[in-house]
Image: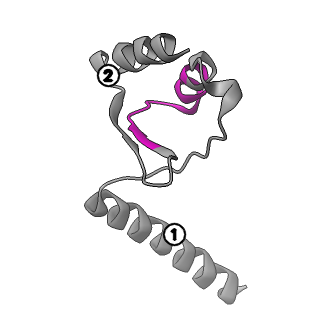
């Protein structure tokens, strides 16, 4: 499986999807991907030759500036909804 996994990594690194892959001191791995959709993430995950042998967790992350913008938009929408509800 080693060569199959290396080919999988090479394919998606060259495609610009796999940004980084590290092995941690406790022998767990962490990788950073750039998916354009949940569907793309699922298709690539299912293609992973090691997929049957690993536990995967997915956490969305973004740069801090984008995260702050999204948070401010969500908080603004929440407060506007709360104001409308309070008026009723």
Instruction: Say whether residue 47 is left or right of residue 21.
Output: right
Q: CA distance from mark 2 to mark 1?
A: 38 Å
Lower sequence index among marks 2 and 1: 2
**SS state under label 1:** helix
Residue named by callout 2: 13
Q: Indicate the quadrant where residue 41 lies.
A: top right
Using the image, determine if residue 1 lies above or below residue 58.
above
Instruction: Say whether residue 50 is left or right of residue 18.
Output: right
Q: Which colour scheme appears in the figure?
A: one colour
Residue farthest along the bottom direction in this orientation? 86
Q: Which residues are magenta?
A: 30-44
40 falls in the magenta region: yes
**Picture coordinates of residue 22, whole percent (x, y):** 37, 42
**82 or 33, which is in the foreground?**
33
Residue named by callout 1: 77
**Picture coordinates of residue 26, whole percent (x, y):** 50, 54
**78 or 21, which is in the foreground?**
21
- Which quadrant holds the N terminus? top right
């Amino acid at each position: 499986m080693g060569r199959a996994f290396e080919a999988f990594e090479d394919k998606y690194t060259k495609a610009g999807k796999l940004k980084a892959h590290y092995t941690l001191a406790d022998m767990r791995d962490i990788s950073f991907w750039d998916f354009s959709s949940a569907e793309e993430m699922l298709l690539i995950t299912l293609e992973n030759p090691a997929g049957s042998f690993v536990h995967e967790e997915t956490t969305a992350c973004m740069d801090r500036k984008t995260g702050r913008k999204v948070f401010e938009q969500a908080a603004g929408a929440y407060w506007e909804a709360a104001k409308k509800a309070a008026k009723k």
